Amino acid sequence: MSRGFYILRQKNYCGGMMYEKIGGFTLIETIIAMVIFSIIVLMSTSSMPSTKDFEMRSKNRVFALELAEKQIELMKTLAYGSVNSAVLVTNPATNPDSGIQFGTSVVVNTIAAGGETYKTVAVTVSWPTALTLTLNTIIAP
């Protein structure tokens, strides 16, 4: 027996009526499709909290990177003799998206290479989720 359902259509064959099959879905097929769709929707919504957490961690890393880049750019604008560790230890900055405070520390070392002296600058940004980000650069006289 074939699938589908039959409806009564009137045809003019000597006033008689005949059944004619038309295509469609059965009730079982519709229920199975709804169950599969529901499972897919539930699986996608259950991953949303982890996606939001990932997004917030990414925003915090970008904020930390921008903060470190600002510190390095500020160090590059200073006169060579005044670049030292005490210059750019700043107050904590707060990420407006997450409300988390970020601390910044700057370490400056002087190195000699090829008869010249250079200063290496390491800017470290840390935040309470036990993460740190460090950017390094070299400043020449």
Image (tube, rainbow, N blue to C red):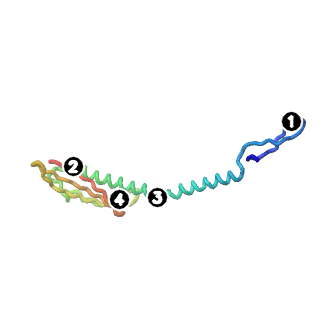
Of the pair 77 and 131, the residue shown nearer to us? 131
Picture disc at residue 84: none
Picture disc at residue 76: 2
Label 4 or label 1, whichever lies nearer to me, is 1
- List x then y, in percent, for residue 6: 78, 45
Q: Secondary structure at mark 4?
A: strand
Q: Amino acid at mark 1?
A: Asn
- List x then y, in percent, for residue 94: 35, 59
Q: In terms of sequence position, does the residue under pointer 4 or pointer 2 come before the other?
A: 2
The residue labelled by disc 3 is 50
Residue depicted at x 34% and y 63%: 130
Q: In terms of sequence position, does the residue under pointer 4 or pointer 1 come before the other?
A: 1
Label 2 or label 3, whichever lies nearer to me, is 3
The residue labelled by disc 1 is 12
Q: Disc 4 versus disc 2: distance between alpha carbons? A: 24 Å
- List x then y, in percent, for residue 135: 27, 53
Callout 3: few (<14), some (14-19), or many (20+) C-alpha neighbours within 10 Å?
A: few
Q: In terms of sequence position, does the residue under pointer 2 or pointer 3 come before the other?
A: 3
Q: Amino acid at mark 2?
A: Lys
Label 2 or label 1, whichever lies nearer to me, is 1
Q: Amino acid at mark 3?
A: Ser
